[in-house]
Image (spheres, rainbow, N blue to C red):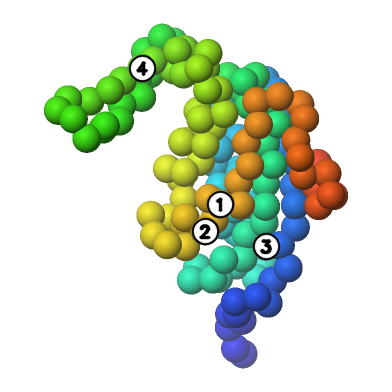
Amino acid sequence: MKTYMAKVGEVEPQWWVVDATDTVVGRISSEIAMILMGKHRPTYTPHVDTGDHVVVINAEKAEFTGKKWKQKMYRWYTGYQGLRSETAEHRRERRPELILEEAIRRMLPKSRLGRVMLSKLKVYSGHEHPHQAQKPQPITFEK
């Protein structure tokens, strides 16, 4: 019996639409990361990009549990001394799609392959998205 290993270009990627309305950020992010990596397929191969494209709509309606809107801090380095930081509540007002993008990015591999997987993620804060030509299929997850 031989183990099947997918080859580059062998797997045809699909397009999925995920509605983030009233979902917990961490739970939906882990499900989306699995789809981007291709772990939902029986032909998953760790060193080949076997994942699908994911379009996330209504990113501003995703929720945190507990007091995370006020307590969770996002920090980043600008090149100058010290760190910039903001709360999750402030980030939701400024760029709500960045909350889901960062959560998903941190769940993907930290390599070239992980950056390719992340490029197949499209997050939008409204209900509209410009990917109708790809005919994305809706997908739902358990809450």
Point out the tag, 3 or 2, that comes first from the N-terminus.
3
The residue under the point 26% across, 32% down is 78
- Residue corresponding to mark 3: 41
Figure check: 29 above or below 115: above
Label 4: how many Cα within 10 Å (few below 14, some 14–19, many 20+): some
Q: Are the residues at dot 4 and dot 1 in contact (C-beta closer than 8 Å)?
A: no
Report if residue 65 is visible in the image.
no
| Amino acid residing under circle 1 | Ser
Label 2: how many Cα within 10 Å (few below 14, some 14–19, many 20+): some
- Residue corresponding to mark 2: 116
Q: CA distance from mark 3 to mark 2?
A: 18 Å
Asked whether 4 or 50 is in front, the reply is 50
Q: Are the residues at dot 4 and dot 2 in contact (C-beta closer than 8 Å)?
A: no
Q: CA distance from mark 1 to mark 3?
A: 19 Å
Q: Is residue 60 left or right of residue 132?
A: left
Asked whether 3 or 107 is in front, the reply is 107
| Amino acid residing under circle 4 | Glu
Q: CA distance from mark 4 to mark 1?
A: 25 Å
Outermost residue to the left = 81
Point out the tag, 1 or 3, that comes first from the N-terminus.
3
Q: Is residue 133 left or right of residue 82?
A: right
- Residue corresponding to mark 1: 119
Foreground mark, 3 or 4, reads 4
Q: Are the residues at dot 2 and dot 1 in contact (C-beta closer than 8 Å)?
A: yes
Can you tell which quarter of the image residue 21 is in? Answer: top right
The residue under the point 28% across, 23% down is 84
- Quarter containing the C terminus: top right
Kindly state the secondary structure of the residue where label 4 is placed. strand
Figure check: 115 above or below 22: below
- Residue corresponding to mark 4: 86
Report if residue 31 is visible in the image.
yes
